Image: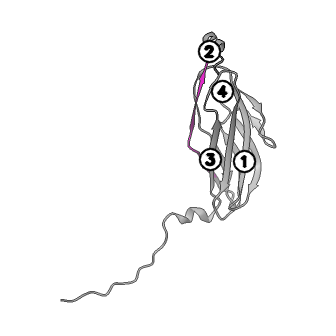
Amino acid sequence: MAFTTPTSTKEEAVGLEKFEHAEVNTNLIVHPIELVVGENMDIEIELANAGKGQAFLRQIEDVVLEGFELTAKPDPYRVEGQNINLKGRKLEPLKAEEVKFGLRPKHKGIFTIAPRIVYLDENGNYKTHEPEPVIIVVKELGIKGWLKGER
């Protein structure tokens, strides 16, 4: 019985090449996710650059929901329609940035916050990242709930 000698192979970690350049990941935090018409809601978007290159943050798209009014601005950034202009802010490798703002619903319904973050990597290539969407339930407080002191 004969055994063959194994030949050497070059092994390489799979998927790591995407981290050679800027790679922005995000986390979307919304509180509360169930509220009443006219009640304030806080939104925080955590942006982290997990890559080895600089990221230049352009905008957060589709984050200011239609039918909601802005109650707290995301300083130092600017709201433009449903988007937040991040003014090309530089995000260094392995660094994070937070964008906080507030909204208030004008009517009841079920809404989905599904923003898209647009940024440039260090080579000027446009990239995007979409965090896990959050579903918001807005109720209308009826007279019975108001008399009972419910929210």
In x, y percent, where is residue 120? Answer: 68, 54
Nearer the observer: mark 4 or 2; the answer is 2
Quickly name the residue at label 2. 145
Spatial CA span between label 4 and label 2: 26 Å
The earlier-in-sequence mark between 1 and 3 is: 3
**Residue 102 against residue 118 in the figure, above or below:** above
Left or right: 57 as drawn, with respect to 113: right
For label 4, the SS is loop
Residue type, numbered disc 1: Glu
* Residue at position x 66%, y 17% in the image: 149
What residue span does the magenta drawing correspond to?
Answer: 127-141
In magenta stretch: residue 57: no
Residue at far left of view: 1
In x, y percent, where is residue 54? Answer: 71, 60
Q: Residues within 10 Å of mark 1 (few under 14, many from 20)?
A: few
The earlier-in-sequence mark between 4 and 2 is: 4
In the rendered image, the quadrant that contains the C terminus is: top right
The earlier-in-sequence mark between 2 and 3 is: 3
In x, y percent, where is residue 14? Answer: 48, 66
Q: Is residue 62 visible?
A: no
The earlier-in-sequence mark between 3 and 4 is: 3
Residue type, numbered disc 3: Asn
Q: Is residue 95 visible?
A: yes
Quickly name the residue at label 3. 27
Residue type, numbered disc 2: Gly
For label 2, the SS is helix
In magenta stretch: residue 129: yes
Spatial CA span between label 1 and label 3: 10 Å
Q: Nearer the viewer, residue 47 or 116?
A: 47
Left or right: 139 as drawn, with respect to 97: left
Badge number at residue 98: 1
* Residue at position x 49%, y 69% in the image: 13
